[in-house]
Each structure stands twice: as C-alpha cells, then as structure tokens.
Amino acid sequence: MEFTIQQIAAMLGGQVQGNAQGKINMLAKIQDAKPGQIAFLSNPKYEQYIYSTQASAVIVKKDFVPKKELQTTLILVEDPYSSFTVLLEEYHKMISFQKVGIEEPSFLGRGSTCGDNIYRGAFSYIGSNVKIGDNVKIHPNTFVGDNCIIGNNTILHAGVKIYSDSKIGNNCVIHAGSVVGSDGFGFAPQADGTYKTIPQLGNVIIEDNVVVGANTVIDCATLFGDATIIRKGVKLDNLIQIAHNVEIGKNTVMAAQSGVSGSTKIGENCIIAGQVGIAGHLVIANKTGIGAQAGISKSIEEEGEKIMGSPAYDVKDYYKSYAVFKKLPELNQRLRELEEKVLSYKSNGHSL
C-alpha cells in the first residue's frame, strides 16, 4: 500500500519541505532506509545520517535546520518520535486487518453470527450462539466456545482458546497460544489426603482495548454469575497467570512471568514488572509500582506506592537494606576479628 508524502504529512499534522508527491510504501531506520521508505530523526546523535539517507522522506522537528544540503524530503512536526509511532500504529493496523474471508476447513456453530469484514482462518472453530463483531480476525487453529461475545476490531491470533461464555470487548488483541476462561485452581482437601475438584462455573470479561500476550492464561471465576475481569486498556505481557475472580483495573500493565492468585483486586494504572508473585484475596491500590521478582503477601493501601523485594516493601528502604545486605560477608569478617581481639584482650588479664 502506497501513500504520498503529502498524505502522510496531513495525517501527522505536519508540513512538507520538498517533493510532496513522492510515494512511500515502508517505514525504516534513518541509517538503513531506501527509496520509497520513510524514517524519522529525533535524537541529535543520528543527525549525520539525514545527509546521506536514501529515504524518500524523513520526519523531523519543525525547528530543524539542516547544516548541509539534503537529498530527501522533510516532514516538519512537533514531535518526530510520537509522529513516527502514529505511523507505526497505522501501518500495523493495515497489515493486521488486511485479511478478509473464510478459509476452509473452518466451523461456525448453530446460532452464531459474524459481522462485516471478518476473517476466519483454517481449522478455526466457533461454537454455538457466539456473537462476533465487525472486522474481527480469527486466525488458524483458534477455538471460541459456546455463548462467547467478541467485540469489533478484535484479533485472535493463531492457537488462541476462548472458553465458553467469555466476553471480549472492542479493539482487543489476544496473542498466540493464550487461554481465556480455563478452570481456576480450585481443589477441596479430603479426609483421606486426596483433593476433590471444585467446579468453576463463572466466566471471563475482557473490556475494550486490552492486549493479552502470548501463552498467557486467564482463569474463569468460580461461581456462576461471577467473573474474572480485565478492565479497559490493560496490557498483559507473555506467560502471565491470572487466577479465578481476579480483577485488574484500567490501564494497568504487567510484564512477563508474573502471576496473580485468586480473588485479588489490582487497581488502575499500576505497573507490575516481570516475575512478580501476588498472593490471593489482596487489594492493590491505584498507581502502585511493583519491581521485578517481588513477592506481594499483603494488600497495598496507599496509592502510588513503589515497592520491591520478597516480601515486598518500600523501594527506597529496599535499596538501603540491600546496601547493607551485600556487605554482610565483610561485616561478618570484621565482627569475627573484633571477637578475636576481645578474647585476646581478656586472656591477657585485662577487663573490659
């Protein structure tokens, strides 16, 4: 797909200096760009490349003044980095949503409906009474169980499994291998030492603009009528475990290999780093920041708190403690030397 430089400038609210009718069909780094490609210059350290780049256009800050003659066309904007990000987003949408149609073999259950411009990849299975919105892309080997709802412009990548009764909002992306709605980890200990499975009868609700990374699992709620809820704008990385009845607040982000135990409520706009473990039945306040590999064993009540460590506590106190902790071998050696001096002092008939 091609655009003129003028069309791109209009999209970004920028001004063109040079050939406004030049054609662009790809994005690239400024040092690697070829004719027909567009790049950006944000960091002054890369300015040297703008004088030699083969890019047909370069996005620059509106006050940029070249020191040499240029062979490329400029698009002048307020923030080149943000503008290039907008282009990346638009390009990604184009390549993500270009597939349309139904590949064979695929299955659509009784009573299920699909909106306009849908894509159903080969070997995809859609159960009964499923409602699928417009412009939804369901890639090969995807399973969607009975009574599910999939909102407009949502993408289910290859191998995704959506269990029955799950609800997924608009503009969501579920990456390959993820499972939504699987049973929560519920087992009742018996007198003979065995465990009896507790049926998991609830569902999962994923609101609009959520991204779920590859091989992430979101378990359903335990009781019928209850739900595990992922609120609007949440971004989950790969390999995350979200247990039954968890609720994750709006615009919270969570990095890979983290896990949240059952019935925990995480607030809005939290940032949770990788390999964090959060115990069950806790409440995490809005805007909490949790460092990598932290272990959260109690609720966090103060909004905006930054914590790390296991068990986790205030990040400033953690670093102060760590400064002492890493010196423990040295301190231990000095203590031994001091003990030896005291014993020697006493053995020579001196009193303290």
Image: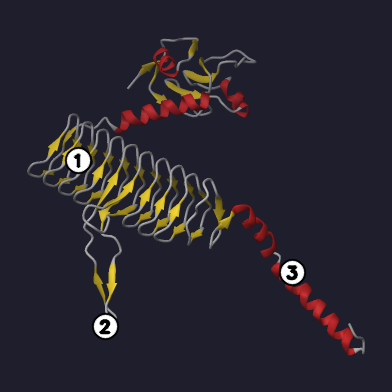
Which quadrant of the view contains residue 24? top left
- For the residue labelled by badge 3, is the local secondary structure a helix, a strand or a loop? helix
Q: Amino acid at mark 2?
A: Asp
Label 3, label 2: how far apart the Cα atoms are: 51 Å
Residue 224 percent location from the top left of the image: 21, 55
39 lies left or right of 228: right
Q: Amino acid at mark 3?
A: Glu
Residue 9 percent location from the top left of the image: 44, 15
Which quadrant of the view contains residue 197? bottom left
Q: 303 or 232, which lies in front?
A: 303
Q: Which mark is residue 330?
A: 3
Residue 260 percent location from the top left of the image: 40, 56
85 lies above or below 156:
above
Residue corresponding to mark 2: 192
Residue shown at the point (85%, 81%) measured from the top left: 342
Answer with mark 1 or mark 3, whichever residue precedes in sequence. 1
